[in-house]
Image (spheres, rainbow, N blue to C red):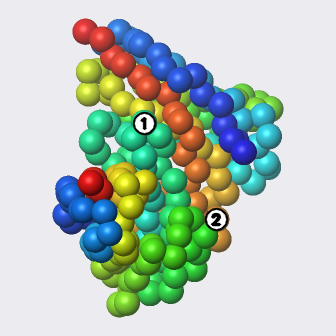
Amino acid sequence: DAKTTQPPSMDCAEGRAANLPCNHSTISGNEYVYWYRQIHSQGPQYIIHGLKNNETNEMASLIITEDRKSSTLILPHATLRDTAVYYCIVRVAGYNDYKLSFGAGTTVTVRA
Amino acid sequence: GAGVSQSPRYKVAKRGQDVALRCDPISGHVSLFWYQQALGQGPEFLTYFQNEAQLDKSGLPSDRFFAERPEGSVSTLKIQRTQQEDSAVYLCASSSAVGEQYFGPGTRLTVT
């Protein structure tokens, strides 16, 4: 049973911000939202994660709604190299919960 | 620093042959994971090691699949009597005790 729902695909223009939505309406209080991406022919790459506060790092920003039922990953200035499948995953960040359940993800195509 | 490496990157096996896939995790990472990724789908969990102990093998699809990590470092995923449905990319990931998972490039297995 899928814990997250993402659109199957989206396009964005190079140099513009890319906003990737994710719904996780059944998220538990101790579950974090994680984002990974997978560029063609490579293994998945960790991007960012958060619990309830917004987070930012050198790759992206993560905005989580106050009720935590949805979130948005923001790539502030998309480049062609950001073309990838993006996975939104909810999991407990702790020693005993280790599996990543990927789902189908969103295929993001950045166009020049 | 060195990331997770996997070998071989590509493997073609005739149906019925045995194969062995190798994973070299990031040095010092306690946890090691194997995932299977069918074409067009997200990765699916196979098995998990904490040091040399295999704590979860619930994702292994059949008793033809066997994984080991005898010294708590390098791991090998073995598939006996390969079938066409075993064709997939096999991904290895490692992490510190509670950290993010870092993935290798994967081994693409094609069974003919």
**The furthest residue to the bottom:** B71
Q: Classify residue B98 by image quadrant.
A: bottom right
Residue occupied by mark 2: A97
Which residue is depicted at the point 45% across and 59% down? Answer: B35
Provide residue B69's location: percent of width, then percent of height: 38, 83
Q: Classify residue A107 by image quadrant.
A: top left
| Label 1 and label 2 in one chain | no
Q: Secondary structure at mark 1?
A: loop
* Residue A27 drawn above or below residue A13: below
Residue occupied by mark 1: B40
Image side of residue B6 versus residue A96, left or right: left
* Residue A90 drawn above or below residue B22: above
> Would residue A90 be visible to someone looking at this image?
yes
Q: Amino acid at mark 1?
A: Gly
**Disc 2 packing (10 Å; few <14; some 14–19; many ≥20):** few
Callout 2: chain: A
> Would residue B96 be visible to someone looking at this image?
no
Which residue is depicted at the point 71% across and 51% down? Answer: A31
Provide residue B30's location: percent of width, then percent of height: 44, 77
Callout 1: chain: B
Disc assigned to residue A76 = none
Which residue is depicted at the point 53% across and 65% down? Answer: B61
Q: Amino acid at mark 2?
A: Asp
Q: Secondary structure at mark 2?
A: loop
From the viewer's side, name the closer residue of A55 and B15: B15
From the viewer's side, name the closer residue of A65 and B12: B12
Provide residue A72's location: percent of width, then percent of height: 59, 26
Gap in angstroms between the C-alphas marked 1 and 2: 26 Å
Provide residue B26's location: percent of width, then percent of height: 31, 69
Quarter in which the C terminus of chain B is drawn: bottom left
